[in-house]
Amino acid sequence: MPQPRRTTGWVNAACAAAALLVAHGASAAPAGCPREGTLGTSRVLSVDPKQYPRVGLKSFPDTLPLHDGEVILTFDDGPSPPMTNKVLAALASECVRATFFLVGKPASGRAALVQRIAAEGHTVGHHSFTHAHLGQISPEAAVEEIDRGIAADEKALNGVETTTPSTPFFRFPYFESTPAALDLLQSRGIAVFGADLWASDWNPMAPQQELKLLTSRLNQARKGIILLHDPQPRTVAMLPAFLRYLKEHGYRVVHVVPAARGGQPEHHSESPAETAATPHEGG
């Protein structure tokens, strides 16, 4: 069952503002953190799928325009209580915003948790309906998997079953894409996210080993889209220490949201500042 969370005034205000945004199919912008000494979210990056149809150096030639020391936190395969709840609690404790690529089938039975993810300011992306190997099934079946996943996520999030995602971000399970599927998503204005580095948290290891592996890779890459999995207990156990590591070593968290229609960034009045992702900026 989802764990109860503290209802501070800050969280209540953030949830109220986010609920209005969710109702209109938009992503909530990070608000300033009321607690000193937290990692925080340094800026918001609006991503236009027309400019960045495919990102992540593990799969594609290009990635998002991050500066040295900037990271984007992404979590796959949820929602999965109680693990996702613990991830949300760890992120909230450091005022960090992330992106969750949800699997449609579990999302369809956990609307309250999906809505909590969005209400706490995180971005909700899509990760198919059953986490199938989309490169190993027919093109028609792959499209059905993608669309059913989007529809289930949207139903859980906004109460409307639609294959037009309110946040046009998709990640292929196992990173198994095909040229036809990539072209289809691009034609529909949906950005495909790969990753720049990951913790290999699908492999058996202790949380301390995962932390050492991830920080070693990050110190080599210096920036990037990081892939993690919120249903993984080892990642849940490792995450608070990783967030402390980021803070203590001067790394900064960037939150990605979709650009508004027309390729212009969403306008938010709250800090941190939002930056539009334009080609070749910062990397």
Image (cartoon, helix red, strand yellow):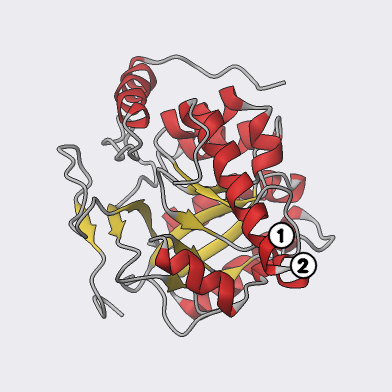
Q: Is residue 274 visible?
A: yes
Q: Residue most toward the front?
A: 140
Residue toward you, 58 or 134: 134
Residue at x 53% of width, y 63% of height: 226
Q: Residues within 10 Å of mark 1 (few under 14, many from 20)?
A: few
> Residue 187's mark?
none
For the point 64% across and 42% down, the residue is 104
Query: Distance from label 2 to label 1 (Cα)?
Result: 6 Å
Q: Report the amino acid beneath label 1.
A: Ala
Q: Is residue 196 visible?
A: no
Q: Quadrant of the C terminus?
A: bottom left
What residue appears at the point 74 percent right and 54 percent down from the top-left corner?
Answer: 207
Where is mark 1, residue-wise?
Answer: 141
The single residue placed furthest to the bottom in the displayed view is 61
Please tell me which residue lies in front, 251 or 274.
274
Where residue 113 sits in the image (x, y, percent)? 59, 27
Q: Amino acid at mark 2?
A: Ile
Number of residue marks:
2
Quadrant in the picture for residue 270: top left
The answer to whether mark 2 and mark 1 are in CB contact below 8 A is yes
Residue drawn at 62 percent across, 72 percent down? 177
Quarter occupied by the N terminus? top right
Image coords of residue 154 (percent x, y):
51, 36
Q: Residues within 10 Å of mark 2 (few under 14, many from 20)?
A: few
Residue 174 position, x and y percent, is 70, 66
Residue 137: mark? 2
